[in-house]
Amino acid sequence: MKITIGSDHGAVDLKEVVKKVLAEFDGVEVKDVGTFGTNAVDYPDIAEKVCADVVSGAADRGIVLCGTGIGISIAANKIHGIRCALCHDEYSAQMSREHNDSNVLAMGGRVIGFGVASKIVRAWMTTDFAGGRHERRVNKIMALENK
Ligand code: RB5
C-alpha cells in the first residue's frame, strides 16, 4: 500500500512518529510531502499535495496533520474524491474505515499524545471497509460533490 503523508509546522514531530508506525507494516511505501521544519506553512497547501496523490491513484491513502487536525481536514474534504476523517481516538479511526471508507486520516499534533496517535494509525491501517449498507451511504456522500 502506498501512503502519502504531510503536515504543517504544528505536527512535524507527530509526522515522524506516524512514519515510524507505518514502517511496522510490510509492503507499505510512504511518501512524505513535508513540511520538514518549524517554519510556518499553510495547511491547505499540504492537504492539496497529499490529496492530489490519493485522487490520482499515486497513493492508496493519505495522512494529513496540523496543530488541531481541523484546518487540514476541512481543506482535504474540499477536494473531490476525498473522505478525510479527523480522529483523536482509536474507535473513530476504526469506524472511519469500516463505515465511511475514509481514504485520508487527519490528526492534530497539539491535541493527542504519540501513544494514542500510534494506536489510531494502527487501527486505521488494519481496518477494511465493511461495504453493504455503508456503501450506499458512502455513495450518497460522494454524490454530494455533484450537487
Ligand atoms: C497553525 O498555527 C494552526 O492553525 C494549524 O496547525 C491548525 O491547527 C489549523 O487548523
Image (cartoon, rainbow, N blue to C red):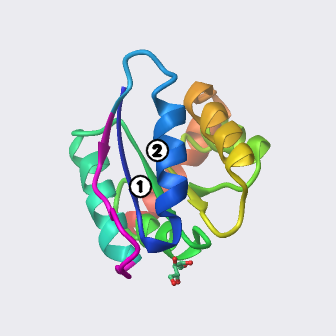
Image coordinates of residue 117 in percent, x first then y, are 66, 47
Look at the numbered discs 2 and 1 and tell me whether their residues touch, using CB distance below 8 Å.
Answer: yes
Alpha carbon distance from label 2 to label 1: 6 Å
Please state which of residues 7 and 130 is positioned toward the viewer in this rendering: 7
Residue linked to disc 1: 82
* Residue drawn at x 60%, y 64% as measured from the top left: 109
Q: Amino acid at mark 2?
A: Asn
Up-down relation of residue 10 to residue 141 (above or below): below
Query: Dominant secondary structure of the magenta stretch?
Result: loop
Tell me the crowding category of disc 1: few under 14, some 14 to 19, or many 20 or more residues within 10 angstroms, Cα based: many
Image coordinates of residue 121 in percent, x first then y, are 60, 39
* Residue drawn at x 30%, y 73% as measured from the top left: 45
* Residue drawn at x 70%, y 37% as measured from the top left: 119
Tell me the crowding category of disc 2: few under 14, some 14 to 19, or many 20 or more residues within 10 angstroms, Cα based: many
Compared across the picture, whether 99 is left or right of 77 comes to: right
Image quadrant in which you'd find residue 4: top left
State the SS at label 1: loop
Q: Amino acid at mark 1?
A: Ile
Q: Quadrant of the C terminus?
A: bottom left
Please state which of residues 90 and 143 is positioned toward the viewer in this rendering: 90
State the SS at label 2: loop
> Magenta residues, as a range?
30-42
Image coordinates of residue 27 in percent, x first then y, are 37, 17
Compared across the picture, whether 106 is left or right of 2 comes to: right
Image quadrant in which you'd find residue 107: bottom right
Residue linked to disc 2: 103
Up-down relation of residue 89 to residue 66 (above or below): above
Q: Is tag 2's residue or tag 1's residue first in the polypeptide sequence?
A: 1
